[in-house]
Image: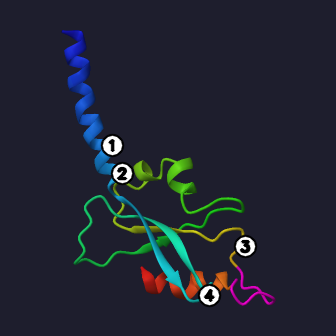
């Protein structure tokens, strides 16, 4: 009896976890500023409606990190469960989010300010 009860309690938790994870979307797009395909993780609101406008929060990773840091190293999905906003976590490699004067392919500030919002 106890084993059956434990299994019955676990099943809804599995569905809740998979539902929460389905809010996370890993996507890629070509950025003209860095002349490369960039990876982005997007976290949608729990009850996302594509016909509705939402505020957008851009979360940037630290040096040495990547676009998955916020979803893998924090409990961001739980923290934002009741918030009606789109959260965008872009890849920026180890760029410091600035444009390089010496490398025309390293225009990361332009990527963050122009390309990424246009994509979202």
> Mark 3 — residue?
96
Report how far apart the C-alphas of labels 2 and 3 lie in the structure: 29 Å
Residue 102 falls within the magenta-colored stretch = yes
Say whether disc 3 or disc 4 marks the residue closer to the N-terminus: 3
Q: Are marks 2 and 4 in contact (CB under 8 Å)?
A: no
Report how far apart the C-alphas of labels 1 and 2 lie in the structure: 6 Å
Residue 35 located left or right of residue 42: right
Q: Nearer the viewer, residue 68 or 5?
A: 68
Report how far apart the C-alphas of labels 3 and 4 lie in the structure: 12 Å
Which residue is located at x 33 percent, y 43 percent?
17
Q: Secondary structure at mark 3?
A: loop
> Mark 1 — residue?
17
Q: Quadrant of residue 111?
A: bottom right
> Mark 2 — residue?
21
Residue lying farthest to the right in this orientation: 102
Say whether disc 2 or disc 3 marks the residue closer to the N-terminus: 2
User: If the image is split into quadrants, where does the N terminus sit?
Assistant: top left
Q: Secondary structure at mark 1?
A: helix
Q: In x, y percent, where is residue 53?
A: 30, 79
Q: Are marks 1 and 2 in contact (CB under 8 Å)?
A: yes
> Mark 4 — residue?
110
Q: In x, y percent, where is residue 28?
A: 46, 72
Judge the density around disc 1: few (<14), some (14-19), many (≥20) Cα neighbours within 10 Å.
Answer: few
Say whether disc 1 or disc 4 marks the residue closer to the N-terminus: 1
Q: Secondary structure at mark 2?
A: helix
Judge the density around disc 3: few (<14), some (14-19), many (≥20) Cα neighbours within 10 Å.
Answer: some
Residue lying farthest to the front in this orientation: 36
Q: In x, y percent, where is residue 91?
A: 58, 69
Residue numbers of the magenta segment: 98-106
Which residue is located at x 27 percent, y 28 percent?
10
Q: Are marks 1 and 4 in contact (CB under 8 Å)?
A: no
Report how far apart the C-alphas of labels 2 and 4 lie in the structure: 30 Å
């Amino acid at each position: 009896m106890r084993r059956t009860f434990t299994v019955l309690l676990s099943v809804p938790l599995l569905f809740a976890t998979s539902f929460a994870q389905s809010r996370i979307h890993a996507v890629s797009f070509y950025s003209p500023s860095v002349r490369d395909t960039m990876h982005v993780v997007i976290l949608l609101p729990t009850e996302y409606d594509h016909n509705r406008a939402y505020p957008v929060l851009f979360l940037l990773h630290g040096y040495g990190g990547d676009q998955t840091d916020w979803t893998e190293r924090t409990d961001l999905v739980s923290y934002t469960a009741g918030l009606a906003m789109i959260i965008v976590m872009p890849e920026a490699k180890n760029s410091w989010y600035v444009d390089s004067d010496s490398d025309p392919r390293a225009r990361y500030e332009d990527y963050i300010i122009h390309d990424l919002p246009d994509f979202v």
